Amino acid sequence: MQPVHLFDLAARHAQWASIRQTVISGNVANANTPGFAARDVEPFETVLDSTHLVMAKTQANHLDISGAAAGTSPDVQRDTWNVHYSGNSVSLDEEMVKAGEVNRAFMLNTSVVKSFHRMLLSSMKSGS
């Protein structure tokens, strides 16, 4: 039996979401600090792309998606942060939107792990 890397990937995603949540809460905590620049972490897709995961092709008739078109997405231009008179660039509205994104990332991660765990349990029950 080959190792299952989905749980490792889910753990990395949860760690990334936790770090992003910490950064967002730091931004909110310093919303009134003069000169504070809002921070964010790089998207998980960028982190995932840097790990160089390759899909396994176990049979000749499996699709080959190793081409350049696989996984490409258009570059999204983000608006720059508005800097207030105090030099602070924290927008509480944007930070709350980011907090919602992190919440959805945690929920997605939990759902994927639950589903995969149920699938493993089901396969073990049917295999014995």
Image (cartoon, rainbow, N blue to C red):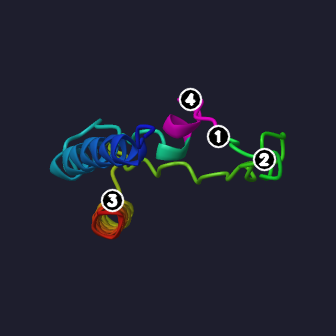
Name the amino acid, label 3. Answer: Val
The region drawn magenta spans 46-54
Magenta run includes residue 104: no
Give the x, y percent position of residue 42. 47, 39
The residue positioned 35% from the left and 58% from the top of the image is 91
Q: Nearer the viewer, residue 39 or 56?
A: 56
Mark 4 and mark 1: Cα distance apart in space? 18 Å
Residue at which label 2 appears? 65
Give the structural element (helix, strand or loop) at label 4: loop
Residue at which label 3 appears? 102
Q: Say which quadrant the N terminus sits in.
A: top left
- First in residue order: circle 2 vs circle 3: 2
The residue positioned 45% from the left and 38% from the top of the image is 2
- First in residue order: circle 1 vs circle 2: 1
Mark 2 and mark 3: Cα distance apart in space? 29 Å
Q: Residues within 10 Å of mark 4 (few under 14, many from 20)?
A: few
Q: Report the disc number at residue 56.
A: 1
Mark 2 and mark 4: Cα distance apart in space? 17 Å
The residue positioned 32% from the left and 44% from the top of the image is 88
